Each structure stands twice: as structure tokens, then as C-alpha cells.
Image (spheres, rainbow, N blue to C red):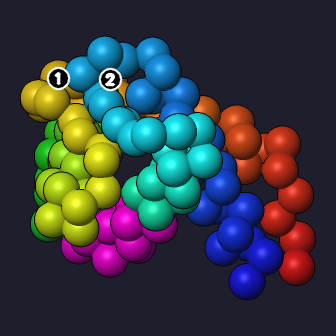
Amino acid sequence: MKNFVVKTIANAGALAVAVWLLDKITLTGDGTGRKAGTLILVALVFGLVNFLVKPVLTVLTLPLFILTLGLFTLVVNALMLLLTSWLAGKLDLSFHVEGFWTAVVGGLIVSIVSWALNVVLPDKD
């Protein structure tokens, strides 16, 4: 359970960095507390998307992963971020990613920051 909380916090932090760095990834809200709550909810959606959809998509596109020597991971991460944005819209969360190339850069930022935060944050139960 603690590992789940740590990963969710890391994802929320990584999404916050992507929102901060990229103008076309937006998070709107009235105050800091509301934005933080929205980030946590979006991080939960992002984690769920990565847990359920990403493995299936990875298996289906395995030849492309092999052909591009793993660079297709950027495309898959972008698609996961776009799917999260779409689901956030359906759940009335104020998180939006505008465009595929923004999602590619955002996915790269989220991956790097999430990895770094997972290294720093404790994850032992």
C-alpha cells in the first residue's frame, strides 16, 4: 500500500513539473489546494492507465519497439498522457494536454521526473 502511495505522489510531482514546463499542458483551478487535489486525482488516473492499458499496448506494438530500439516508448508514453487527458476531461478534472508533440515532450518529462522521484522517495513496505 505504501508503495502505491509513493508512486502516486511521484506521478503527481512529475505531472506538476510537466504542467510547469509546458504551456500546452494545463491544470486550472481556484487555489493551490484545489490544484494539488486535482493533480493527485490525475496521478491516480495516470497510474491506472499505465497499469491497465500500457502493457497491452506494449505487447501489441512489440515489433515497433524492436525496430526502433525502444524509441517507440516515447510514442506509447505520449499516448498514455493523451488518454489520461481525455479521461480527466470525462471525469471533469481540469487537466488537459493539447496535441501529440506536447504529449511526447510531456511524457518524456513525466518519465524522467517520476523516475528521479521514485529513486529519492522511500518505497519499502
Q: Which residues are magenta?
A: 44-57
Looking at the rendered structure, which numbered label has been put on residue 28? none
Residue for point 30% across, 47% down: 94
Q: Quadrant of the C terminus?
A: bottom right
Quarter-of-image position of residue 123: bottom right
Numbered disc total: 2
Quarter-of-image position of residue 120: top right
Left or right of 90? Residue 28 is right
Where is mark 1, residue-wise? 101
- As measured in the structure, the alpha-carbon distance from the residue carrying label 1 to the one carrying label 2 is 6 Å
Q: Position of residue 122 (x, y in %)?
A: 87, 58
Count neighbours of disc 2 (C-alpha within 10 A) and say few if under 14, some if 14 to 19, many if 20 or more: some
Looking at the rendered structure, which numbered label has been put on residue 105? 2
Q: Is residue 23 above or below residue 49?
A: above
Q: Quadrant of the N terminus?
A: bottom right
Residue for point 23% across, 40% down: 96
Taking the magenta stretch, the answer to whether it contains residue 53 is: yes
Where disc 2 sits, the SS reads: helix
Where disc 1 sits, the SS reads: helix
Taking the magenta stretch, the answer to whether it contains residue 82 is: no
Is there a contact, CB below 8 Å, between mark 1 and mark 2? yes
Q: Position of residue 65 (x, y in %)?
A: 24, 46
Residue for point 60% across, 61% down: 8
Left or right of 89? Residue 115 is right
Q: Position of residue 107 (x, y in %)?
A: 36, 36
Q: Is residue 13 above or below residue 86?
A: above
The amino acid type of the residue labelled 2 equals Val
Q: Nearer the viewer, residue 12 or 65?
A: 12
Left or right of 83? Residue 3 is right
The amino acid type of the residue labelled 1 equals Trp
